[in-house]
Image: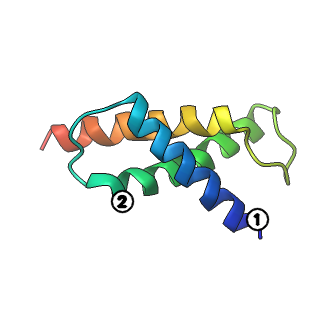
């Protein structure tokens, strides 16, 4: 059930990241949502490294959105260089 929670938070974080960073994405909405899931996982991992979250604790929703925005920005930067 923990993975399902990450996916749901990532879906919402990806959608909000898309609203924060509008524009054309090379991969479309599906890739943006997958990047949102990756951003939520990244936020949880970085938060655990920083001591903000316990090992079993999920990242906060705001942290997941920030992670999704960061992953989306990195993706756009690399995709734009091609």
Q: Which of the image's four quarters has the N terminus? A: bottom right
* Rendered position, 31 above or below 22: below
Crowd class of label 1 (few under 14; some 14 to 19; many from 20; radius 10 Å) = few
Q: Give the number of the mark in front: 1 or 2.
A: 2
* Rendered position, 16 above or below 9: above
Judging depth in this view, the residue of 24 and 72 nearest the camera is 24
Q: Which residue is mark 2?
A: 30
> Between marks 1 and 2, how big is the CA–CA gap?
22 Å
Residue 69 location, x and y as percent?
46, 34
Q: Secondary structure at mark 1?
A: helix
Tell which circle, 1 or 2, labels the residue nearer the N-terminal end: 1
Q: Residue at x 65, y 32 (%)?
A: 62
Q: Which residue is mark 1?
A: 2
Q: Quadrant of residue 64?
A: top right
Q: Secondary structure at mark 2?
A: helix
Residue 15 location, x and y as percent?
46, 45
Q: Residue at x 25, y 54 (%)?
A: 27
Identify the residue at the far left of this view. 82
Residue 23 in the figure: left or right of residue 38: left
Query: For the image shown, how many numbered marks are present on the structure?
Result: 2
């Amino acid at each position: 059930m923990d993975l399902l929670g990450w996916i749901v938070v990532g879906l919402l974080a990806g959608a909000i990241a898309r609203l924060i960073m509008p524009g054309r994405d090379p991969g479309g909405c599906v890739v943006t949502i997958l990047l949102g899931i990756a951003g939520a996982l990244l936020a949880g991992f970085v938060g655990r490294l920083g001591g903000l979250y316990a090992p079993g604790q999920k990242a906060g929703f705001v942290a997941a959105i920030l992670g999704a925005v960061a992953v989306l920005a990195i993706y756009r930067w690399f995709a734009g260089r091609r």
